[in-house]
Amino acid sequence: MSCNLTVEIAGVSFKNPIFVASGTFGYGLETQELTDSSSLGAVITKSITRHPREGNPPPRIVETPSGMINSIGLANMGVERYIDTVIPRIDEIGTAVITNIAGFSIDDYLYVMEKLEACKAPICGYEINISCPNVEAGRMEFAVDPELTGRLTESLREVTKKLLIIKLSPNVTGIASIALAAEQAGADAVSAINTVFGMSIDTQSRSPYVQTNVGGLSGPAVRPVGIACVYKISRKVNIPIIGIGGITSANDAVEYILAGASVVQVGTANYKNADTARSMIDELELYLAENGIENLSELTGGVIPNE
Ligand code: RRO
């Protein structure tokens, strides 16, 4: 039996639903010796900002039970250099590229997007990071406020016809309300989740392991959090949901899809093995074949909730 893994989000077609998450795959060029990125559904870049950023002081990563805490602080090359050095090489990635944008004001986000639109960057869309847990200035201001999320989404929608995805934070009381605000303002999809606030302390030195004390927790430890967020969002919005958080196998991806995700992103697992996402594609095809499912879309939202 042949299974159809292709998925469409707002008219953009992807060869399969296995994407790699922002911040875990560089700009899509650094991993070429570690995996075949051309077989992935899409590559999401590290967040790009208006100006280059050094990020937070080290240590900025620590391993935790079934996961890790990061406090990178949005280190990136800035939009100018991204356009000069990465955009001309996008073809080498061999699959759809979605550029992740971060900022501290609506103006910041607009600046980066307008630059990319002006140079006709051959990317298929944008993932808008409103949910970085690791920067003090305007810390998650957009992610926690439906009105601000709506205003930002609306402003960006006016600038691009490309795919517009809003990446949500789990560190809020009502993630579905933020997703709804994004949908109503014209977003094509939402991604959920970014990392969960986390802290880990060395009991000898009494110092937190990351320099900023608190960071963002990711990996299998957060998978049930991500699945619950996707499930709650799917009850409130109609646009596609991109599931993220602790995915290490096709089975994990299927859990997200059953909860309501149309596609998924593999993040922290890339640090262990950058070939993880690629190897999940065959695994997913096997799952579909074994379960007599011809089209992946039949699975989306297929959870049978208890009464
Ligand atoms: O760079 C980071 O510290 C970071 C970002 Br932008 C983000 O969106 N999520 C995260 O866990 N870390």
Image (cartoon, rainbow, N blue to C red):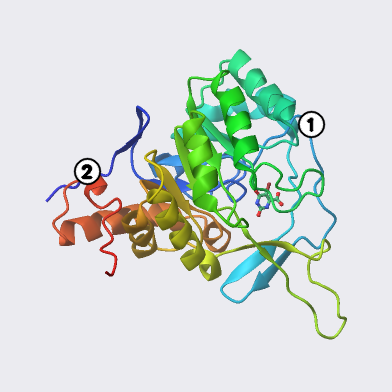
| Residue labelled with disc 2 | 4
What separation in Å lies between label 1 and label 2 (alpha carbons)? 41 Å
Q: Name the residue located 28 percent from the left edge and 70 percent from the top edge.
A: 306
- Horizontal arrangement in the rendering, residue 256 relative to residue 145 (left or right): left
Tell me which label, 1 or 2, sits earlier in the chain: 2
On-image quarter of the C terminus: bottom left
Residue 66, located in which quarter of the rendered image?
Answer: bottom right
Near mark 1 (Cα within 10 A), the count class, few <14, some 14-19 or many ≥20, is: some
Is disc 1 placed on a helix, strand or loop? loop
Where does residue 154 sit, x and y in percent of width and height?
57, 26
153 or 207, nearer to the observer: 153
Q: Is residue 171 above or below residue 238?
A: below
Query: Can the viewer see residue 132?
Result: yes
Does the rendering let one see residue 192? no
Image: 66 above or below 14:
below
Depth check: give the residue in front, 62 or 239.
Answer: 239
Residue 132 drawn at (x, y percent)? 68, 48
- Residue at numbered disc 1: 51
Horizontal and vertical percent position of residue 115:
67, 19
Q: Which residue is the extreme one toward the right?
A: 205
Query: Please, what is the three-letter code of the amino acid marked with disc 1?
Result: His
Left/right of residue 242 with respect to residue 83 in the rendered view: left
Left or right of residue 25, residue 4 in this image: left
Does label 2 point to a residue whose CB lies under 8 Å from ligand 1?
no
Q: What residue type is labelled 2?
A: Asn
SS state under label 2: loop
